[in-house]
Image (tube, grey):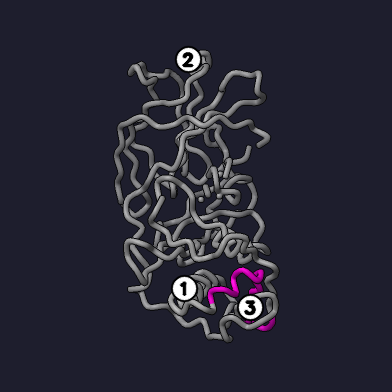
Amino acid sequence: MRFPGIVLAALLALPVLAGCQRSEPPPAAKPARVSATGAFERAFGPAPTTDKGTCFAFVIYFPSVKNPGKFMPFPFFSFDERSLKKVALERMVGGMDESSYRGEFLRLFPPGSRLLSLSEDRGTVSVDYSREVGQLALDPEKNALLKSSVALTLAQFPGVNKVRVLSEGKELIPELALKEQPAASVAEPGEPRLLTVIAMKESAEEPVKEVDALFDRPVEIKEFQFRTDSGKVIAGDVFHSMFDMAAVLKPKDPAVLKNLSTLRVRYLVVDKLGRAATGDGSVALKVRLHQD
């Protein structure tokens, strides 16, 4: 199953998590720990586990609106180690549209911006963007933010020593050495946030057989309850997803969810560094097909 588009990209806009999610109870076999970068572990604690192949956890740094000059780390996962840098930079271009973070991340890239190519040569990564990104050369402040976002994001990957940023082959940011960024430039992620709640269906005609409440990072679910807007508890089993980033409900009576556009959720979750979050309120219920 895929997460729809951050984490369904760190789940609805999270395409990287998409291929990695799992909504069944944990298997009996001993799970293996995800391979995480040091940047991921500093921001979000020990990596979660997986029973499906080898997975990699990393972060992308987005410029903060609330803390100018600082960068917020956001977690992503992928099974393809060779494409981690490319995925990170492509997601950086796309930005974050999740309502839980609306207005908190500065959108650096002009409309139409694309990552054209990424190449490596003896520790130097060359990043070539479309011509739209070349406009940043006219804005020293945004150009500096772009440099820091790319440097922080690429510096977490072993073997990367230098980076060049281009726009359609023209140098935008001269080659720079990726030295450790000052700790002050990275903002504290804060408490966990609920991103979205999604009803999953096998087909348009089938009833809802699974509801996923997606968080922005791996969490331990201390309490999670799904209710209708009238306050009726929706009976069923609740599981963690793979990467511990979602509470997944398997309703005993799928008919209860028919035609619902909102749900009430009440929860208490704690991330891997002990940051707790609670919530109790109505949220939009988005419907997705498993093949989406």
Q: Which residues are magenta?
A: 121-136
> Neighbour class for label 3 at 10 Å: few (<14), some, many (≥20)?
many
> Which quadrant, please, contains the N terminus?
top right
Which label sits in the foreground, 2 or 3? 3
The quadrant where residue 28 appears: top right
Element assignment for label 2: helix
**Badge 1 local density, few (<14 within 10 Å), some, or many (20+)?**
some
Residue 134 on the magenta span: yes
Report the front residue among 290 and 57: 290
| Residue appearing at x 37%, y 78% in the figure | 182
Q: Which residue is mark 1?
A: 142
In the rendered image, the vertical position of residue 100 relative to residue 129, given as above or below: above
Q: Which residue is mark 2?
A: 256
The tag earlier along the polypeptide, 1 or 3, is 1
Q: Which residue is mark 3?
A: 166
Question: Between marks 1 and 3, how big is the CA–CA gap?
Answer: 15 Å
Residue 135 x, y percent position in the rendering:
57, 73
